[in-house]
């Protein structure tokens, strides 16, 4: 039997009851639900809300979700040609607040009705890239051996393929119009590099004492990854989810602008392409045709970046521990904090 070295932190002390499984038999269902709410919802929300970047990012994302809701509920007119006077500027007519195009299309309607598909595409791209990277990286780093060799060989294969040509070939081959499918295609090999980076971090984490203790107690691989390994990777995963989502926005706009991706409904990239084709770059009266979709694109990218930086505080164990210590100090005084440090 492998002797386990017990440290002070391993002993059942105050503040570490969340690690104890034996106390679960004494807890009622209401206690468990209350503990789950406090640890999984209330405390992360307090940590996130304490950061100005999170509040600003959340406000911007709420605006985009509200715009998508307006489109889904049909609260704004559908875009169509000759529905308004031509080339009205921004805020010149409040019936068309973002102006109109040279063919009399309401720009607000065009951008609002493109928002739901863009959000779905961004979510699908981020989830696909980071989800697959977490699965591959954690399994390869934790299991090692043949599993590591096979998974890393697959990752190296995808990393060796140039991303943009692969996306263009897949877009031409499948002609995807479903936004979720488009998001997956745009990040088809984005996960490979992230998976290898996560594997490197898991190689360090798996040697930590608490992971070794879980293995000694016979805890299963899935539970160790879920409870001990992945939570320590969440700051890195969160930041890379934001990067993947932002990459999806820019890639989709670029490929729609170039006409590589097919479409049946207007998107932000299509609006930019039509503005450029109609000379909006050189006609001051049509400048709003380019500015409006660019504001939508930059605003969403900024919201994701701010949310990613703010959520780093939520998933960062050091930040949460420090904030918990500060709260304890405020509530119980300096004497308690000093005792905890000792």
Image: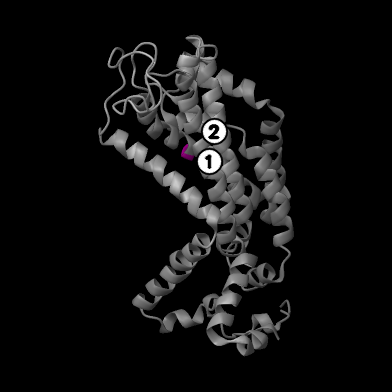
Q: Do residues under tags 2 and 1 come within 8 Å of each other at their CB atoms?
A: yes
Against 142, residue 276 (above or below) is above
Position of residue 151 measured from the top left corner of the image (x, y, whole percent): 67, 42
Against 342, residue 126 (above or below) is above
Say which quadrant the C terminus sits in.
bottom right
| Residue for point 61% across, 64% down | 228
Hey, which quadrant is residue 193 in on the image? top right
- Magenta residues, start to end: 123-128
Q: Would residue 315 be visible to someone looking at this image?
A: yes
| Residue for point 62% across, 35% down | 190
Hey, which quadrant is residue 130 in on the image? top right
Position of 303 compared to 210: left or right? left
Hey, which quadrant is residue 201 in on the image? bottom right
Position of 195 compared to 286: left or right? right
Position of residue 53 measured from the top left corner of the image (x, y, whole percent): 55, 53
* Residue located beneath label 1 in the image: 126
Say which quadrant the N terminus sits in.
bottom right
Position of 220 compared to 207: left or right? left
Position of 46 compared to 148: left or right? left
| Residue for point 26% across, 36% down | 73
Position of residue 51 measured from the top left corner of the image (x, y, whole percent): 55, 59
* SS of the residue under disc 2: helix
Q: How is the image coloured?
A: one colour
Q: Nearer the viewer, residue 74 or 155?
A: 74
| Residue for point 62% across, 46% down | 136
* Residue located beneath label 2 in the image: 248
């Amino acid at each position: 039997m492998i002797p386990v070295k017990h440290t002070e932190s391993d002993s059942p002390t105050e503040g570490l009851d969340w690690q104890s499984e034996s106390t679960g038999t004494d807890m009622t269902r209401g206690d468990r639900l209350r503990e789950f709410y406090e640890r999984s919802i209330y405390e992360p929300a307090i940590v996130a809300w304490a950061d100005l970047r999170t509040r600003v990012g959340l406000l911007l994302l709420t605006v985009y979700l509200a715009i998508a809701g307006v489109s889904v509920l049909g609260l704004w007119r559908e875009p169509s040609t000759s529905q308004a006077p031509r080339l009205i500027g921004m805020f010149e007519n409040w019936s068309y607040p973002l102006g109109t195009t040279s063919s009399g299309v309401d720009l607000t309607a065009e951008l609002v009705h493109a928002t739901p598909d863009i959000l779905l595409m961004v979510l699908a791209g981020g989830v696909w890239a980071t989800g697959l990277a977490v699965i591959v990286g954690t399994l390869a780093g934790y299991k090692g051996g043949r599993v590591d060799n096979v998974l890393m060989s697959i990752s190296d294969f995808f990393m060796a393929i140039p991303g943009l040509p692969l996306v263009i070939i897949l877009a031409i081959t499948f002609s995807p119009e479903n936004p979720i499918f488009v998001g997956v295609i745009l990040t088809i090999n984005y996960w490979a590099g992230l998976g290898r980076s996560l594997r490197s971090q898991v190689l360090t984490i798996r040697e930590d004492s608490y992971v070794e203790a879980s293995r000694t107690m016979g805890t299963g691989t899935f539970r160790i990854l879920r409870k001990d390994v992945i939570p320590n990777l969440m700051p890195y995963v969160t930041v890379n989810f934001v990067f993947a989502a932002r990459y999806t926005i820019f890639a989709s706009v670029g490929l729609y602008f170039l006409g590589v991706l097919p479409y049946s409904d207007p998107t932000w990239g299509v609006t930019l392409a039509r503005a450029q084709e109609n000379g909006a770059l050189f006609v001051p009266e049509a400048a709003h045709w380019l500015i409006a979709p660019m504001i939508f694109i930059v605003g969403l990218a900024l919201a994701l970046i701010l949310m990613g930086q703010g959520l780093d505080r939520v998933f960062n164990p050091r930040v949460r521990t420090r904030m918990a210590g500060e709260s304890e100090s405020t509530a119980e005084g300096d004497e308690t904090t000093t005792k905890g440090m000792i």
